[in-house]
Amino acid sequence: MTIRLLIKQMLAQLPAALRKLDPRHLWRSPVMFIVWLGSVATTVAVFTDPSTFTISLAVWLWLTVVFGNLAEAVAEGRGKAQAASLRAARTDTVARVVAPDGTETTVPGTQLKIGDLVLVAAGEVIPGDGDVVVGVASVDESAITGESAPVIREAGGDRSAVTGGTTVLSDEITVKITSAPGETFLDKMIALVEGASRRKTPNEIALSILLVSLTLVFVLAVATLSPMADYAGAPQDLVVLVALLVCLIPTTIGALLSAIGIAGMDRLVRVNVLAMSGRAVEAAGDVSTLLLDKTGTITYGNRQASRFVPVGGVSETELRDVVRLSSLADQTPEGRSIVALALAEGADDQDLPVGAEFIEFTAQTRMSGVDLSDGTQIRKGAGSAIHGWVGGTMPVELTDTIESISRDGGTPLVVASKTGDTSRVLGVIHLKDVVKEGMVERFAQLRAMGIRTVMVTGDNALTATSIAAEAGVDDFLAEATPEDKMELIRKEQAGGRLVAMTGDGTNDAPALAAADVGVAMNTGTSAAKEAGNMVDLDSDPTKLIDIVEIGKQLLITRGALTTFSIANDIAKYFAIIPAMFLVAYPSLDTLNVMGLATPESAILSAVIFNALIIVALIPLALRGVKFRPASASDVLRRNILVFGLGGVIAPFVGIKLIDLVISTIPGIG
Amino acid sequence: MSDTWSGLLTIVTLVGVLALVYVPLGDYMARVFTTPRHTRVERRIYRLGGVNADAEQSPRAYTLSVLGFSLVSIVVLFAILVGQSHLPYSRDLPGMPGWMSFNTAISFVTNTNWQSYGGESTLGFTAQAAGLAVQNFLSAAVGIAVAVALIRGFVRVRSGELGNFWVDLTRGTIRILLPIAFVGALVLVLNGVVQSFTDSTVTTLAGHSQVITGGPVASQEAIKELGTNGGGFYNANSAHPFENPNGFTNAFEIFLILLIPVALTRTLGTMLGDRRQGLTVLGAMGVLFATAVAIATWAEIGGHSQAASAAGAAMEGKETRFGEWASALFAVATTGTSTGAVNSSHDSLTPTGGGVTLVNMMLGEVAPGGVGAGLYGILVMAILAVFIAGLMVGRTPELLGKKIGAREMTYVALYTLSVPAIILVGVGSAIALGSTPGAMGNPGGHGFSEVVYAYTSGANNNGSAFGGITVTSTFFQVTIGLAMLLGRFIPIVLVLLLAGSLARQAKVPETAGTLPTSTPLFGGLLVGVILLTTGLTFFPALALGPIAEALS
C-alpha cells in the first residue's frame, strides 16, 4: 500500500472518525475516553483563558482523539469496501422449491427454510447455502473466492457443498438448503469483513487491562502532583496537568489497538482466508503443532516419474526413448511427467510417428502404451500385468528393482515391448510422490520458530517414512483415519500444545472442531466449514503456514506498539516536568536535555508529538510489523532494539523538531 | 587500609560468602518446602493447632489462612503493647498509646517495623521479645510461604491446591529462621552485641549515676536482619553500638539481610527444575543492587551536596566506625530489601544517596527484596515484562509454561497498581494537609522527600525513615498504619490468587518459539521494565524531591 493511497483512505474516513467522537463510542477504549475528557476540560478552559497556548492545547488534544478514531475508521473502511462487493452478490434471488410430491413453487430467497429442496439450472444464482443432493454442475464461485475458474459440485462425497450467491454455469442440480437466510456463509462473511461481529479477543482483553491499570497509575500520579506542586510553590493549571496526563497514558497503543486487530483479520481476507473470530487469528500465532495433509500440501499429490531404471542390458537412451514414445499420447499426470523427465534427460522432442495408435489404460489390461505402424507394441504397467503380457519368467534383476522402488514408497511401472513373437522387458519407471518445491526450507523455518510439523497420510508407514524424510517434517501419521487424527490432536493438546489443521471432508469435522485452528477448505462439505474456525476460499492447504505467520505478525505488531508507546513516556517527562517547575526549582532545567525553548513550547511539543505519532504509526498498524521466521530469541532481540530502544529515542528527536517549529509562534516561543 | 580498599574488600567478601552459601541454603529451603516428612516438634505443633498437615489448601483457603493468621497476630500484638504495664520484665513502663500501638502492631506483623517510638524508652523486655521478636519470625515466615506458594503455582499442572499455609509457616520458622537466627545471634554476642535481661547502672567519670539499657538485643538483632524486619531494640537501630558495635558486625548484619532473599532465587530454580531461571532472576536483582550501591557510594564519598562540600565529607548522620562506604552499602541493602534497619541517618544522606534509598523502595523492593516478598515481587514484574515484550515474539505471553491471560493480567495489573496508588494517595493527602509542613524536619524539597519517604517505606513494608519528620500525630499513625497494612496484604492476596490461577493451568511445552526467560536478554528486559514502570510512576514526585535537591 502506498502512502498516497493511505492518505486518500484517511481523508475519506475523516467524517467517520469525527462521528466516532461520540463519548458512548469512546467509552469502549478507556485510554481514549480519558483523552476525550481532557479535551472537553481544556476546551472549557479556553473560554476562561483564551491564550494561544490553551487554544493550541485544546486543538491538539481533540486531534489526538480524532487521529485515534481515524486509525480504526481506516481499518474498518477497507473491510466495508469488500463487504459492499459481497453484498452485490447477495442480490434478491428467487428460488424454485421442489415439494416432496414433485411440484415446483417459486419463493423469494429470503424465505427459504432449512431442509428445502431447490432446483438450480445453468445461468441461475444458487439462492442459499446447501448440499447438492441430485446432479452435477460446474459453478462459478468468483463472487466469494475471486477465482474465476469454475468448480465442479456434485451430489454425494466431499464436493457437494454450494454457497449461496454463486452461479451455476452448466447442467442442473438439486440443492438441499442447510442454513437459514441471514445466517448464510455470505452473510457471515459480510459481517466479518465489516467488523460488525468483532469482539475483543482474549489477548486484547488482557492488554486492555494492562492499559487501564497504567492509565489509572498516571491519573493518580498527575492528580497527586497537584498538591505536591502547591507545596513546592508552583501551583499548576488544570490544562497543564491534562496535557501531562494525556502524554503519559498509553494513547498510541490505546488508539491503534482495535485497528491492529481489524487489520489482522483484513490481512487474512487478503489471502482469501476468513477467520470466524479474532480469537482464531491469535491462536494461529500460538500454534506449536501443524497437522499437514500429505497430498496436495506437502506433495503435488500425483505420482511423477523420477527415474528410469533399465534392465537386461538395455541402454539408458533406448529405455528413455521408448518410454517417451509410450507416454506421448498419455494425458494422465503420470504420463505427462514421464515425457517431461525423458525430455529433461535429453530425448528428442519429436511427435508420435504416423500410424501409431495409443492404447489406453483399462481396468482389465492394467496397462497402457502404443502400437507402432511397424507392428511393435510397447506397454507399461504394474509388474504383474506386464508379466502376464510378456509371459515367461521375470529376470531377478527386475524383481529386485521393483522391490527396492516399492520399499522407498515409490510406484514401479514396468516397460516392455513386443515385436512379433519376441518380447522383452526394457526397464522400470520409478514413479513417486514429489515433494513440492521449497517445502523443506519452509519446514526448517517452522522448526526454527518452534513449530512441529506432522504429516498426515493414508499411505502405509513405509511410503510415509520416505516422504516424511524427504520433506523434512518432524513426524508423520501413516494410514491415518479421522479417528487417528482426532487422537493425535487430543494428545498434542494434552501436552499443552496448540494444534492447527486443514480439512474438507465431513469426517474431518470433529477434528476441525477440536483443533485450535481448524481451516476448512471452501470446496469442502458444509459440515467441515461449520466445524472449522477459518475457511480458505482458495482451498489451498499450504496456506496454513501463511495463516500462522499472519497470527504471529498480529501479536508482534500489538506488542511492538505497546512497547513503543510506553517507552515514549520517558522523553515526554523530560519535556514536561522541567517546564512545569522551572519557576519553583530553576535547577530542574538540567533535565531539559532537549533544550526546548519555553515551558509552553515544551508542553505543546510533547502533546503534538503524542498526537502525530498515532498518525505516523497507522500504516504500521495496518500493514503489521514485518515478520521474518526466526527463533523467539532473535525476533525478541530485534524488536526490543527497534521498538523498545527506538521508542525511547524517537520522541526526543521528534519533540525537539516540533519545538523548533512551534517556538516561532508568538505566545508559545 | 584506605576507606576505598576496605569498602571494596567488604563488598567482595560479602559477595563471596553469599556465593558460598547460595547453593546449600537455596537447595535446603527447596527441600524444606517439598518434603512430605514432618519433624516431631512440628507434629506436636500441628496437633496443638488442630491442623491436618498432610492436607493441601485451595488458593482461597491458603489466602484466608494468611489473612486470618495475620489478623490474629495484629490483635495479639496490639494487646501486648497496650497492656505491657501488666506484663513482667516491663521495666515499669506504661502501656503504649492506642494509635501508636495500632501503628506498631501493623508495622511488625507486616514485616515493616516502622517505629514511631524510641525502642528503649517505650518498650519493656517482654513486649520486645514476646511481642516484636515473635512477629519478626512469623511475618518473615509468612513472606516466604507466599513466595513458595507462587513458585508452586508455576510448578504445578492442573492443580487446585497451593500447599498448606500452616505447614509452610511452621517449617519456615522452625527449619529456616530459628536455626540461622540462633547462630547469627551467637556470632553477634561473640562480637560484642548485648544480650541480657537487665539494665545496668554505672557511675560516670563525673560521678553521676547512669542507667544503661540492656536487654535481649543480640537475639532480636539477628532475626531483625535475617527476617528483613528492621525494627531496632534501640531507637538508633543498627547505628547504636550495642546493636552493631564494629565493622565486622556491620558486614555480618548486611550478610544476614541479604542471605535469604538471595538464596530464595536458588530455591526458585531448584523447585522449577530450571536453575538458570533462578540465576536470571538473581542476575536482575544483582544488576539493580550493584547499580544502587555504585551510585550511593559515589554520592556519599564524593559528598555531592553543598553542606558536605563545606564540611569536607558527607559524615553527618554517619557513624565514624563505619564511614561512608559501609554506610552506603548498609543503606542500599536495607532499602533493597524490606529491612529498614539503618546504621546511619538516611535523612542526612546526600540528596543523590537518599534518592537511591527512596528509589530502591519504589522499585518494589526487589533487589533482592524482603524475605519472600522480594521473590514474589520480582516474579510479578517478570510476568509484566513477559506480557509487554512477549507479544513481540509473535505468541500470546507465557512465563515458565503458563499463559498470561486476562485473569492473570488482572492480578498483575492490580498488584503493580496497588502499592504506587497507596504511596501517591498517602503523599498527596499528607502534603495537602496544612499541618504537614510543621511535622517536617526540613523545609522545601527535602521536607517533601521526608513525606514521600515515609509513605514509600510504609507501603513497601520497609520501615526505615527520613527521620527528620515527626510522625506521632494521629493522622500519620493511622495513614501510615493503613499504608503498611494495605501495602502488605493487597499484594499478598493478589499473588496467591495469581498462584492459584497459574496452578490450575496446563503447562505449555517450551519450543524455539517460546520467549526464553532464562537468558541475560530477558534479565535485562526485566530490569528495564522494573525501572521503567517505577520511573514513570514516581518521576514527578522524585523530581520535586531528591532530583530538585540534587541538582541545586
Image (spheres, coloured by chain):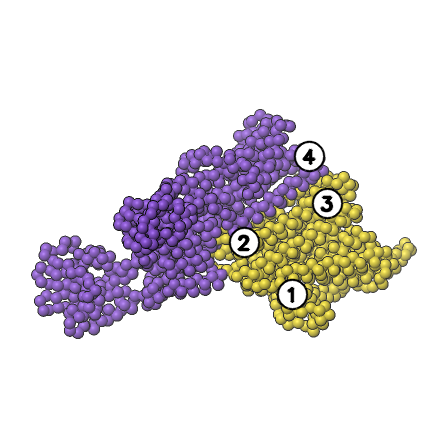
Chain colours: A purple, B yellow
Gap between marks 3 and 1, in whole Å?
41 Å
Protein chain holding label 3: B
Give the number of the mark in front: 3 or 1. Answer: 1
Decide: marks 2, 4 in contact (CB < 8 A)?
Answer: no
Decide: marks 3, 4 in contact (CB < 8 A)?
Answer: no
- Mark 1, Cα crowd under 10 Å, few <14 / some 14-19 / many 20+, is many
Decide: marks 1, 2 in contact (CB < 8 A)?
Answer: no
The reply to whether label 3 and label 1 mark residues of one chain is yes
The reply to whether label 1 and label 4 mark residues of one chain is no
Type of the residue with mark 4: Pro
Type of the residue with mark 3: Glu
Decide: marks 1, 4 in contact (CB < 8 A)?
Answer: no
The residue tagged 3 is: B450
Mark 2: secondary structure: loop
The residue tagged 1 is: B164
The residue tagged 4 is: A235
Gap between marks 3 and 4, in whole Å?
20 Å
Mark 1: secondary structure: loop
The reply to whether label 2 and label 4 mark residues of one chain is no
Quadrant that contains the C terminus of chain A? top right
Mark 3: secondary structure: helix
Q: Is residue A10 visible?
A: yes
Q: Foreground residue, A171 or B296?
A: A171
The reply to whether label 3 and label 4 mark residues of one chain is no
- Whether residue B244 is situated above or below residue A665 in the rendered picture: below
The residue tagged 2 is: B405
Disc on res. A289: none
